[in-house]
Structure formats: structure tokens, C-alpha cells
Amino acid sequence: MSSNRILTVSRAMAEAIAQEMRTDPTVFVMGEDIGAYGGIFGATQGLLGEFGPERVRDTPISETAFIGAGVGAAMAGMRPIVELMFVDFFGVCMDAIYNLAAKNVYFSGGNCKVPMVLMTATGGGYCDAGQHSQTLHATFAHLPGMKVVAPSNAYDAKGLMISAIRDNSPTLYMFHKGLQGLAWMASPDGAAVIVPEEAYTLPLGQANVVRKGKDVTIVTLSMMVHHALAAAAALEKSGIDAEVIDLRTLVPLDRDTVFKSVAKTGRLIVVDEDYTSFGLTAEILASVVERDPSVLKAKPKRLAYPDIPIPYSRVMEQFALPNAAKIEAAVRETLNLKKAA
Amino acid sequence: MNLADIAIPQGLWDTGKTPEGVVANWFYREGSTVPAGATVAEIMVEKTNYEIAAPTAGTLHVLISKDGVVRPGSVIGRIS
């Protein structure tokens, strides 16, 4: 069943969920505005009409209650998909996430699995300030017991969603608002891509080399993949050949793909929209230098969000966000080159 | 050669309240083969999306690209 049909990320997510709901009666969806509204970032559009309110459940604004309920349902044999509207709201429901969802399989001696998907919107760049713009990748990747994915395009979004639903571990599915393909929020051209109509899975824990190169390795994920590709295209004009790795999954982390690439290029830039300190960028650096620091021909470089709450002002937020120009400059720095003429 | 316009249906939204919408997305690239009835585009009017279907099977020609402003009756593309 080949197709030349393009899907936005939001439609790819909704299609993945619908296909799993058709074949598995234990799959259902819960969250704020995921029913009649279709999810404020479109990830559940059309589901209420097809599956009805028993399986597509709008909840009150009590994340503590409905994420806790999701954990219980998962332990009782269901496969709930629960939406935490903005990842920033984790503060009110973290006990259900990291003490219940992540740990109950251990506390029960492996007897109670928690096959829940917790999907949540991440990312800024659209002036929504400090409580609606964070990515918080590392916050969740740091805590053992959960798998964590963060797709950069519609093809990966569908495959990772189906894998997450079928996986027996609790999986945090972090989707960037700016990649969803919503008309009111610009998304990069590479986010909406051709997506097969049939259901398919992608392995959890496998990075994707989205651009091959020999001079420098740029490791990133989610929205920053598109900025890295734009930087790589600009660098190509100066004869610099950058390799770009889209991690796709944070937990499990594909350290092998990163290491092999750095062993080839000798140079490493890690880009993340999450905060800099104690973050994903440092973890990637550590995974290379712990294995063999001699593969590096130059100092590795972290490029992430500064350690400040995200400002509301467009000028200030854009100043703080990583972007293609900053990635390009970081690459030139690691290659000991001056700025582009 | 058969030509069919892809037009925004009249009365799709209340133009008294909101005269214009925008092409939010095209779901096939220029020159793609599309099946009859496939959702080829979506229009957004004040955060509400409307799907636009291919009136017939054929080759898609995009006349109003993503982010272009449309009204009911606008021809946004053609199938040949």
C-alpha cells in the first residue's frame, strides 16, 4: 500500500493512535481537551468521532488524578495513552509519573507492567513564556524506569507512537509544538513528510543519521534537527561536510551511533532546546569521552538553552534559543574557522 | 484531458464573522497523483480546520500554496 501522501506530525500521531485503537480494544486516550477539541496540538483529532467518549475521555484539569488513573488502568491490563497538555505542567503530577508509572514494575517484582504512553507537548519559540515553553528532555530521561522519545518529523512520529503503545514500559512521548503542522504555529518544511498508510513501528533506542558527513558530528533531536540541517546546508557552501544525528529516542539512548560518527569525524557539537547544565548535551559528551576521548580532534561543544527561565518577549526568547546560525558558528569554532565571509 | 478545480465550498464558514481563511497544509506535493476523494489540503479559519477533498483522481496542481489567503469559492488547485 504505497502512498505519496504527506502528513503533518499531529495527523501522523492521530493516525497511529487510531490504527492501534482499531486493532487493540485495550488502547484508549485520556486528557484535557483531547476529545471534542482533538487535542490542543491536534494529536487526537478525529478520535472521539470514531471511537466515542468511552475510549476517548476528556478529563477535568487534574493531572494528578488522570495520570494516576492511567497508571492504574495500565496495571489492570489496559494500554492507556494519556496527554499531559504541556510538559511544563509535570509539577503537579510528578508523583504519578516517576513514583508510580516508572517504578511500579520494579516494586511489584516485575508482576505489574505499566504499558502507558504519556504524550506531552514541548518547546518554545512562540512567545508562551516560562511555564509553556520548556522541553525538559533531561528531566524525564534522568529518571529510571521510563522510555522517552522525541520525534522530529511525521514519519518518525507515527512509527514511534505505535512502538510506544505496543511497548510494555511506560513511555514518555515528547512532541514539539512547533513541529505539529498547525496553521497557527509555523513549522519547518521537513516536519510534514510522506507517511505510509499502514501501521509500522520504529525501534525505540535507534538514532537516525539524517545527513551523512565527514568533518563534524552534530547530535540533536526534535525541533533542533531542522536547525541543524539548515546549519549543515549553510556550511556545505563553505565546503564543510557536517553529519547530523537525530537521536529520536532519549531512553534508551543510542550511544553507539553517536560514538561511531564521532570516531569518523573527530568533532562533536550537541544541540538541545532543553537547559544546558546537567542535561542531554553533557550526557552525549560523556558517552563519547568515557568510551575513548582520543577520537576527538577538537574540544566538543554543547549548544543548549541557557540556564534561565524562558522569557516571554520575542526578542529575548529568540536571543536565548539555539538556532541554525548558532550551530553554524559552533561548527566553525570547533573547526577553528573564522565566520563566513 | 479532464480538468477539475479544487475550490473552497461556498458556505464552509460564516464569512460575515471571518471573511478569510488560510491554506494550512497541502497533503500532496505539486505534480503528485492523488486518488479521488483524498484529503488534499486543509484550510484554517480562526483555529478551526476544514479538510478539502480531491474532486476526482489525477495529477495535482497547486494554485494557492501554504499560508495563502482564501475565501469560499477560491480555487486553490486543479486536478488534471
Image (cartoon, rainbow, N blue to C red):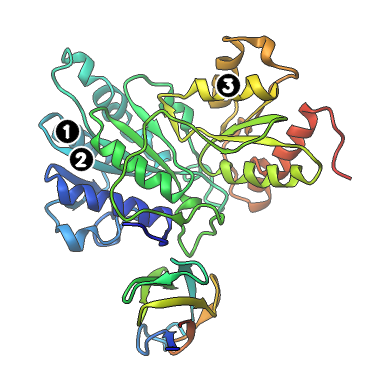
How far is the residue under mark 3 from the one under mark 2? Answer: 37 Å
Q: Which residue is mark 3?
A: A260
What residue lies at 42% left-to-right and 61% top-to-bottom? Answer: A4
Q: Nearer the viewer, mark 3 or mark 2?
A: 3
Proximity of marks 2 and 1: CB atoms separated by less than 8 Å: yes
Label drawn at residue A74: 1
> Neighbour class for label 1 at 10 Å: few (<14), some, many (≥20)?
many
The chain ID associated with circle 2 is A
Of the image marks 3 and 1, the number of the one nearer the N terminus = 1
Q: Which residue is mark 2?
A: A80
SS under mark 1: helix
Which kind of residue does numbered mark 2 sit on?
Pro
> Neighbour class for label 3 at 10 Å: few (<14), some, many (≥20)?
some
Q: Are marks 2 and 1 on the same chain?
A: yes
Proximity of marks 3 and 2: CB atoms separated by less than 8 Å: no
Q: Quadrant of the N terminus of chain A?
A: bottom left
Which kind of residue does numbered mark 1 sit on?
Ala
Residue at the front extreme? B1
Of the image marks 2 and 1, the number of the one nearer the N terminus = 1
| A156 vs A91, nearest the viewer | A156
Residue A148 quadrant: top left
Q: Is residue A46 left or right of residue B11?
A: left
The chain ID associated with circle 1 is A
Of the image marks 3 and 2, the number of the one nearer the N terminus = 2
Which kind of residue does numbered mark 3 sit on?
Lys
Label drawn at residue A128: none
SS under mark 2: strand
Residue A162 at x, y percent in the picture: 29, 42
| Residue A41 in view in this figure | no
What residue lies at 60% left-to-right and 25% top-to-bottom? Answer: A261
SS under mark 3: helix
